[in-house]
Amino acid sequence: MSGKRTRLGDALDRLAPDVPEFEREAILDHALDSRGLAGASPETAAWLSMVSYVRHVLTDYDALLAEGYDRDSARHFVADETTEILTSWGCRRPLEG
């Protein structure tokens, strides 16, 4: 495992210690592959990747976008479900407004 992946994994483990292994690996892959997160701290990259993964993969966020909702509205409609998933993973950090 690369040093950067290890640092991201450690940050993700601190943020959400109960993330299932499959989701953990997908979140880390996204964090490493995202050019937009290349310069972010491990904690920031892990957090943003995790929230993005939950929204896009585990909620109806993409379906809402496809129906014509703007990003802010779609995020609002999936916020409770996103929070429930993050909480089930042991995450205590709240979603930003």
Image (cartoon, rainbow, N blue to C red):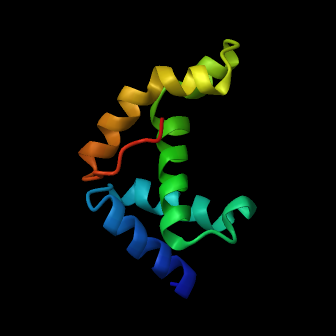
Specify the quadrant of the image occupied by residue 64. Answer: top right
Q: Position of residue 91 (x, y in %)?
A: 30, 52
Please state the horizontal and vertical placement of residue 63, each as a whole percent of the image. 60, 20
Task: Give the camera-side residue of 20 and 49.
Answer: 49
Residue 84 visible in the current orientation:
yes
Left or right of 41 in this view: 6: left
Between 58 and 52, the one nearer to me in the picture: 52
In the rendering, at what x and y percent does residue 92 appear?
A: 28, 51
Work out which residue is located at the far top of the displayed protein and give it.
67
**Farthest front residue in view:** 97
Can residue 2 be seen at all in this image of the molecule?
Answer: no
Image height of 84 relative to 31, above or below: above
Q: Residue at x 48, y 20 (%)?
A: 77
Task: Tell me: 76 left or right of 33.
Answer: left
Residue lying furthest right = 35
Q: Vertically, is 81 above or below 15?
A: above
From this view, report whether residue 25 is shown above or below residue 59.
below
Q: Which corner quadrant of the image does residue 21 belong to? A: bottom left
Q: Residue shown at 54%/53% (left/top)? A: 48
Name which residue lies at 33% across and 39% down: 85
Total numbered circles? 0
Rendering coords of residue 54 (x, y %): 46, 41
**Viewer-side residue, 61 vs 95:** 95
